[in-house]
Amino acid sequence: MLNHYEIPDPFQTFVAKKYANVKGLVYDFFAKEWYLKTACCGEELYAPNKKTMVKIRLYHTRNECLNGY
């Protein structure tokens, strides 16, 4: 009988390790605001709603962290 061993995909393991601690957007019920810890630099961002958070995150990653990719 032939044993089949799965060979792990290196890209999938890289992505899994890279994003292991990323939570994404978290809503703080008591402060009534959205919270995000950026994956690129680990800075904490806060916004009153999701739409504003997306704008802040895009501005932060494109202009502050990556210096205008």
Image: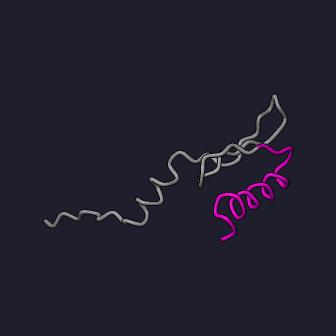
Give the x, y percent position of residue 13: 40, 59
Q: Is residue 25 above or below residue 55?
A: above
Give the x, y percent position of residue 57: 74, 56
Q: Tell me the quarter of the picture where residue 9 sits.
A: bottom left
* Count of picture labels: 0
Q: Tell me the quarter of the picture where residue 14 sits.
A: bottom left
Give the x, y percent position of residue 47: 82, 45
Q: Is residue 52 above or below residue 11?
A: above
Q: Residue at x 82, y 39 (%)?
A: 33
Does the stretch in magenta take in 12? no
Judged left or right of residue 15, residue 27 is: right
Does the stretch in magenta take in 66? yes
Q: Quadrant of the C terminus?
A: bottom right
Span of residues in magenta: 46-69
Q: Is residue 42 above or below residue 16?
A: above
Q: Residue at x 68, y 59 (%)?
A: 61
Judged left or right of residue 61, residue 46 is: right
Q: Nearer the viewer, residue 48 or 4?
A: 48
Q: Nearer the viewer, residue 1 or 29?
A: 29
Q: Residue furthest top?
A: 30
Q: Residue at x 73, y 42 (%)?
A: 35
Judged left or right of residue 39, residue 61 is: right
Color encoding of the figure: one colour
